Amino acid sequence: MKDQLELGDDEFSNMLLVLDQPVTEANHKDYKFENEEMQEIADDVWAMPAYMTPDDDFSMFFIFTKIMSGETVVAFSEGELVGTDFQLSEPMPTGEGLNRLNEEQPDRAKAVLHFLNQISKADEGSWRMISDEDLEDADDEN
């Protein structure tokens, strides 16, 4: 494995940003990205556009949610129009979502990564490498 992972690296897909505190009604506005604001879409699940424009079928959303350990993590989901319904894909780890966004919109991916790094630098979260075993355990729980 490389000493310094970068956006677009295969290993970067296994990076996960874990927040120190859960997202709540009281603090969700602290996590605005540009002009976007989070909305609670289910209990303890908050979503916010990371990339969405009217002239592109591709869209990516931040998903701030609790995982089985009780920790709050930043994940991503792709948005998709199915008929007249807008749906979000299964959440993916932070790094995987950033790499996917980087494939479609590299400049936007860099801006999103900068936003997430600011959360980490403010000691409000930390980056963690998840193992293949972690991913398999999560699949077994579903």
Image (spheres, rainbow, N blue to C red):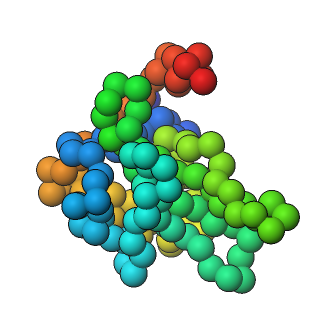
Q: How many marks?
A: 0
The residue at 28%/69% (across/down) is: 29
- x%, y% of residue 57? 74, 71
- x%, y% of residue 83? 85, 64
- x%, y% of residue 129? 38, 32
On the question of residue 2 being in view, the answer is: no
Asked whether, in this view, residue 102 is left or right of residue 86, the answer is left
On the question of residue 64 being in view, the answer is: yes
97 vs 133: above or below: below
The residue at 63%/66% (across/down) is: 59
- In which quadrant will I find the N terminus? top left
134 vs 50: above or below: above
Choose top left, top right, bottom left or bottom right for residue 119: bottom left
Asked whether, in this view, residue 17 is left or right of residue 52, the answer is left
The residue at 71%/76% (across/down) is: 56
The residue at 31%/34% (across/down) is: 71
- x%, y% of residue 141? 55, 19
